[in-house]
Amino acid sequence: MLDQPLPDMTLTPAPLPPKGLAPLAQSDAFYRALLATGQAPLRLPEQGNMLVTRRRVAPGLTLAMINRARHDEIKHLRQTLRDNGLGRTPVILSPDHPCPNLIEIGALPLISPAAVALLDLTQPVAIRHAALHQKWRNRLTRAQSAGLQVRRQTMPHVPNHWLFTADAAQQRQRGYRSWPTALTLAYAKANKGQAKLFQAFEGSTPIAAILILRHGNSASYHIAHATARGKTLSAHNLLIWEAMAWLASEGCQQLDLGVINTEEAPGLARFKLGTGAQLSQLGGTWLLWPPMGRLLRPIAALDRARMRAPSDAP
């Protein structure tokens, strides 16, 4: 499987997404989940109701994080932070689109932009099916003919659910960290019916599952796992296809399949792009610490090129 070529990885320059399609990290649903876990996120109305989270990293030092936000009014961002009590707080910015002009307000680029796979759900089912890559479509057909039963339900409040247990083991094995289970359960509780669990059963045995989080007119692929048998039967393909159909029937316009990492997870990248999803470049990761702005600006200017969108490259 890993020796197969990846689907087209071309980054096509595109305008900013509609404001109604807010990423999960900037959604009202995520805000409610954070409140439910006892956190105190901020909203910045001067910046389109931008969502800011905060974390205490050391005694007397709090770090603020702004993830997947639209930075349409960059020149006013520093003033907005001051007006909301964050004028001297280090802020980690991870914009939803390339923002090389963050350098102009003293932000220092830390990590080059990644890309996410976004799946358009507004097209008719025939067009969505035709957009599937051939090998992906073949696996879907195999799963559909395997006699599997697909069940959809709201995520139950069960901390030791088999999907959480399997996901935790996978995180340990592959060395990454995702949301804590408590936050996922808080999301489901604070947003009634918006955390949907899709499971594939062979007889009475679950062999694959995905958890989809709805937020406004969008949804995000959150957790997934397939057993060895589930992989053999391509159950994951079937679950994504069924989730796409259900989301579209509910008026959802877009499914965010998450970051594409062709180096560390080429198989997952191939799976996501095989759905016909399009790549959208993010804005990288930046540090904005207003008291250090003048000192950081010369360093930041050296890295400006790698934070540009493809259309801005010289």
Image (spheres, helix red, strand yellow):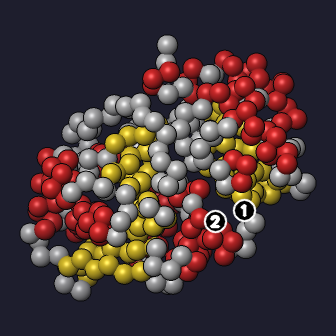
Q: Describe residue 64's horizontal placement relative to residue 20 as left or right.
A: right
Taking 286 as reference, is 314 above or below it? Answer: above
Q: Quick check: can you spot residue 255? A: yes
Taking 230 as reference, is 254 above or below it? Answer: above
Local SS, label 2: helix
Q: Describe residue 254's horizontal placement relative to residue 145 as left or right.
A: right
Residue at the right extreme? Answer: 60
Observer-nearest of 274 and 80: 80
Residue pointed to by mark 2: 31
- Place of residue 42 in the rendered image (x, y in percent of width and height, measured from the top left): 74, 59
- Neighbours of disc 1 within 10 Å: few (<14), some (14-19), many (20+): some
N-terminal label among 1 and 2: 2
- Place of residue 103 in the rendered image (x, y in percent of width and height, measured from the top left): 70, 27
Number of the label disc, if any, that sits on residue 225: none
Q: Describe residue 173's horizontal placement relative to residue 61 as left or right.
A: left
Residue drawn at 41 percent across, 30 percent down: 13
Taking 289 as reference, is 161 above or below it? Answer: below
- Place of residue 5 in the rendered image (x, y in percent of width and height, measured from the top left): 23, 36
Label pair 1/2, CB-CB below 8 angstroms: yes
Observer-nearest of 92 and 26: 26
The three-letter code of the residue at mark 2 reads Tyr
- Place of residue 25 in the rendered image (x, y in percent of width and height, measured from the top left): 57, 56
Observer-nearest of 222 and 3: 222
Alpha-carbon distance for marks 1 and 2? 7 Å
Residue drawn at 85 percent across, 45 percent down: 82
Residue at the top extreme? Answer: 314
Residue pointed to by mark 1: 41
The three-letter code of the residue at mark 1 reads Pro
Residue drawn at 73 percent across, 33 percent down: 75
Q: Quick check: can you spot residue 185? A: no
